[in-house]
Image (tube, grey):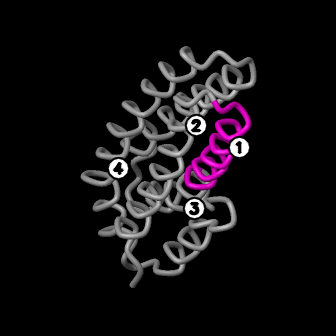
Amino acid sequence: MASVIEHFAADHRACDDVFARAEQAIAQRAQRQAADAFARFHLLLDAHFRAEEDVIFPAFEAATGMSAGPSAVMRSEHGEMLALCEDVRRLIAAGEFDEAASLADTLFSIMQAHNMKEEQILYPMCDQVLSAHPQVVADAIARLGMPEIAQ
């Protein structure tokens, strides 16, 4: 069976790689490249969150009865990260690179702590409880890895 932790952790790394390219462009004050790279990152991150929130989390919650547990915390953090993404995109568009870099650093710190919680706590729990539902996992994985965006 496909593994939630294996595929979603790999997707975290893919998002990190695109984020690093965006940060580099911000540091170089290359507005068009920064905007393009950050837009790609935002699309990848949103696709990742949608796969979790629309497929994995509901199946996990149905299987465990834990609707106010770890998946609720992750949803809240997703909202916070997406709001920060919008703020960084706005700052890049305005040419405010120092502020964009500072906010991107904050976003990266939140993202790393979030990913650690998912990879060490939630994903192993999902793999355990969703082992009886391989199609759910396969459906969620199919929503990841949008290579045309990551390039």
* Left or right of residue 111: residue 124: left
CB under 8 Å between callouts 4 and 2?
A: no
The circle drawn on residue 118 is: 4
From what the image shows, is residue 42 above or below residue 1? above
Q: Secondary structure at mark 1?
A: helix
Residue 33 magenta-highlighted: yes
Residue 35 forms part of the magenta stretch: yes
How many numbered marks have been drawn onto this rendered protein structure?
4
User: Residue 128's quadrant in the figure?
Assistant: bottom left
Residue highlighted by disc 1: 36
Residues drawn in magenta = 30-49
Looking at the picture, does residue 149 appear above or below residue 109?
below
Label disc, if present, on residue 25 of the rendered structure: 2
Q: Is residue 122 above or below residue 76?
A: below
Q: Secondary structure at mark 4?
A: helix
**Which is in the foreground here, disc 1 or disc 3?**
1
**SS class, disc 2:** helix
Circles 1 and 2, Cβ within 8 Å, touching? The answer is yes
The amino acid on which the numbered mark 2 sits, given as a three-letter code, is: Ala
Amino acid type indicated by mark 1: Asp
Residue 4: percent from left, percent from top: 40, 68
Tell us which disc is closer to us: 4 or 2. 2
Query: How far is disc 1 from disc 4 in space, using C-alphas?
Result: 28 Å
**Which residue ends up furthest to the bottom in the rendered image?**
1
